[in-house]
Amino acid sequence: MSSEVRQLLLDLAVQLTGFLLAFGILKKLFWGPVLGALDSRRDKIASEFEGIEKAKQEMERLKVEYQAHLTKIEEEARGKIQQAINDGRRIASEIEEDARTHARETLEKTKEAVTLEVAKARVELKEQIVDLAIQATHKVLQQNLDEETDRRMIEAFIKDISTLDKGNG
């Protein structure tokens, strides 16, 4: 073997030893922390994905819960609207019934008042007729009794009664 080959083998052996020594030192000092950092990063990313998945599940649960709550609120609102409609109809019915009762009472009072007024008018008319009859009788008795005078007095009496009847009717 020549010295050049020996030198080459020696250089190769030194380089290989240096490489292995450098590799061992790097593995001991740097490879562990780098792999640890990569493992830590991988675990963190996996944890974040799990957190995202949990957040999605929580959002879905909240969405379902919100939808159920919204449906409940809508049902309550419909119930309140229906109750308000029923109350409105009931109140309208009560107002209508009160108005009918009031109208009947007013009609009855009016009928009573009209009946009373008619009765008063009849009493007044009778009194006026009696007064006229008394006046006519008085005039007849004071005047000479002849047929023509009697006829004029009776016609005047009838005319007075007609005038009174038209005034009261």
Image (cartoon, rainbow, N blue to C red):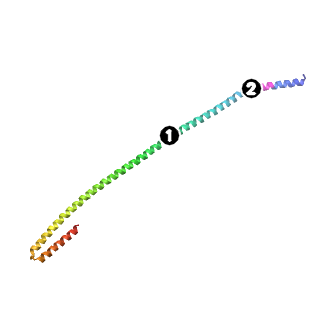
Residue numbers of the magenta segment: 16-26
Q: Quadrant of the rendered structure where residue 31 is? A: top right
Depth check, mark 1 against mark 2: the one in front is 1
Q: Quadrant of the N terminus?
A: top right
Estimate how packed mark 1 is, as few (under 14), some (14 to 19) or many (20 or more) residues with alpha carbons within 10 Å: few
Earlier-in-chain disc, 1 versus 2: 2
How far across and down, in percent of the image, does residue 59 sit?
55, 38
Q: In this orientation, which residue lies closer to the viewer: 103 or 29?
A: 103
Q: Is residue 136 left or right of residue 78?
A: left
- Residue 44, given in percent of the width and then of the height, sits at 63, 32
Q: Nearer the viewer, residue 55 or 112?
A: 112
Secondary structure predominantly adopted by residues drawn in magenta: helix
CA distance for labels 1 and 2 = 63 Å
What is the x, y in percent for residue 135? Answer: 13, 71
Q: Residue at x 49, y 42 (%)?
A: 71
Going by the image, does 152 lie left or right of 52? left
What residue sits 13% from the left and 69% below the top?
A: 133
Numbered circles on residues, count: 2
Up-down relation of residue 30 to residue 137 (above or below):
above
Q: Secondary structure at mark 1?
A: helix
Residue in the image at 59% along x and 35% along y:
53
Q: Which residue is under mark 1?
A: 68
- Measured along the vertical axis of the image, is residue 2 above or below residue 161? above
Q: Quadrant of residue 169?
A: bottom left
The amino acid beneath tag 2 is Ile
Q: Position of residue 120 (x, y in %)?
A: 20, 62
Q: Residues within 10 Å of mark 2 (few under 14, many from 20)?
A: few
Q: Nearer the viewer, residue 139 or 64?
A: 139
Q: Where is mark 2, residue-wise?
A: 25
Does 51 lie within the magenta span?
A: no
Q: Is residue 18 magenta?
A: yes
